[in-house]
Amino acid sequence: MGRSATSVAVMPQSHPLSITLLHSERSDMYSQPRVLAFGTYNVRKHPRVGILIDGLRQNGCIVEEINHPLELSTAQRVEILKKPWKLFGFGWNLLTLWSRLRRDAKQWMKHNGRPDAVLVGYMGHFDVLLAHHVFRKTPIILDHLIFAGDTAKDRGAQGLKVKLLKKLDRMAINASTLAVLDTEEHKAMLQPEDNGMVIPVGAPEEWYVARDRAGENRTRDIVFYGLYTPLQGTPVIAKAARILADRGHAPHFTLIGKGQDYDEVRDITRGLDNVEFKDWVEPEELPRVVAGHAISLGIFSTTSKGLHVVPNKVYQSMAAGCAVITSDTAPQRRMLGDGVVFVKPGDAEALADAIEELLSDPKKLAQAQTNATLVAERFTSVEITKELARWITNRIH
């Protein structure tokens, strides 16, 4: 597939610190940009920062990590962004991790000097404040995929809570030199004086590997995976499954995940034997599971946030070689082109029609899978980080 493999040394799992150095035999290795990935991010649960690290390495940067993972799920992190006072509930744990991060950063700089740039991973609203304090006069890149205020509003919050979370967003962005966003719509939410860059979410290498391993052994089934938040539009998927059943079609749906719309989805699909629910699939297994399906479903909501994003599941599912159906929104159409099948947001009838059309015509299904495979090559880690690598290089020359 033309992507170069990257060898990464991994510390023993019992050790909370991961400091990883890409070694080079070149005598001028330190003329390459040195980037320090920093924070409490968890690559296993949130692969985005791993994609950026891998891509920067393939684009000529030396990347080391100072990482003490905070063992919280995405849902728990979002809950903290929605309710910052819950920070005190795990405050001691966070302060302990921050103490280690600060210690390790000081030790690293004692031996290496200052890095050329610091990368703070996804969900780093708090980590970037620490990075700003520790790495003074060093460019700090914040991967700001989630606006806390926007996310809370999408999940039903309003009033003072949203205002406070927007303040948190502003503090995080102000602490960074460059805010990385995933779509032009999110970039437009920055202030005119902010420095922003759009980098698509992309997909880790293992999703492309899963595609190759799946080969011709895919089922004719449909898969969805996600948090069942309003952004996902899972009730639309459930209604589409019901519509197809009423038409006499019963393709097998595998719905992976849980969340606030879970009970509603269960109610809508009650009595449908072709809908299977899985609360959880291990991250290491998810690429293989998804790649075994013919069709993967994206998002279908009509919320403001739903109209601003291209979800990671769409990039991942394309990389896995599935035909992908998702909502027809400006950012998704701009980013994905003919790599996916678009349907009107919130329209269960349109989703049912798209599923029925693909499954009733093997040629159309195969073409949709081929389109996804071709377009996915634009979103490998090395491709999506080229501009960021140039930005870092320009800062040191």
Image (cartoon, grey):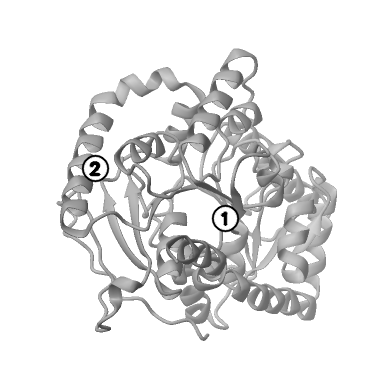
Place residue 93 in its image quadrant: top left
Q: Residue furthest bottom?
A: 2
Report the amino acid beneath label 1.
Answer: Asn
Res 361 visible:
yes
**Residue occupied by mark 2:** 101
In screen coordinates, is 136 left or right of 393? left
Q: CA distance from mark 2 to mark 1?
A: 28 Å
Which residue is located at x 66 percent, y 44 percent? 186
Question: Relative to residue 304, is residue 203 depicted above or below?
Answer: below
- Residue matched to label 1: 312
Give residue 117's position: percent from left, percent from top: 39, 55
Look at the numbered discs 2 and 1 and tell me whether their residues touch, using CB distance below 8 Å. Answer: no
130 or 253, which lies in front?
130
How many neighbours does mark 1 have within 10 angstroms: few (below 14), some (14-19), or many (20 or more)?
some
Q: Would residue 249 be visible to someone looking at this image?
A: no
Q: Quadrant of the C terminus?
A: bottom left
Residue furthest to the front in view is 397
